[in-house]
Image (cartoon, helix red, strand yellow):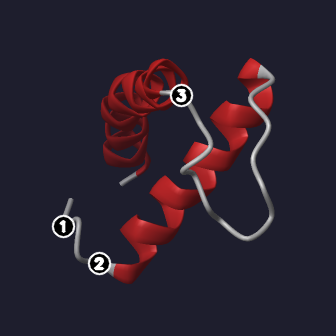
Amino acid sequence: MNIEDPQVKQMIEQMKWEIARELGIPLSNDGYWGNLSTKDCGKIGQLIKKRIPVILRYQQRKK
């Protein structure tokens, strides 16, 4: 997975929003995350880190 790939960037950005919604963390529509606590950002990042390998394994199985 190339982090510079626009599709990968879009996937990760979408995951951020989905995870924040799942955790009940309010996000502003303008994409500004400066009002979030470090703890909340860490929770989101931790779940992204856990989910990416699962997604990659699933995609490899589909091939």
Q: Quadrant of residue 29?
A: bottom right
Q: Nearer the viewer, residue 50 or 20?
A: 20
Foreground mark, 1 or 3?
A: 3
| Label 2: element kind | loop
Q: Helix or strand or loop: what does disc 3 sit on?
A: loop
The three-letter amino acid code for the residue at tag 2 is: Asp
Q: Label 2 to label 1, Cα distance in Å? A: 5 Å
> Which image quadrant is residue 58 in?
top left
Asked whether, in this view, residue 37 is left or right of residue 46, the answer is right
- Residue 50: image quadrant is top left
Find disc 3 in the rendering and name its residue. 37
4 vs 45, nearest the viewer: 45
Query: Front-most of 20 and 5?
Result: 20
Whether pointer 2 and pointer 1 mark residues with C-beta atoms closer than 8 Å, the reply is: yes
Q: In this figure, which residue is indicated by the disc labeled 2?
A: 5
Please name the residue shown 57% across and 52% down the image: 33
The residue singled out by tag 1 in the image is: 2
Of pointers 1 and 3, the one earlier in the residue sequence: 1
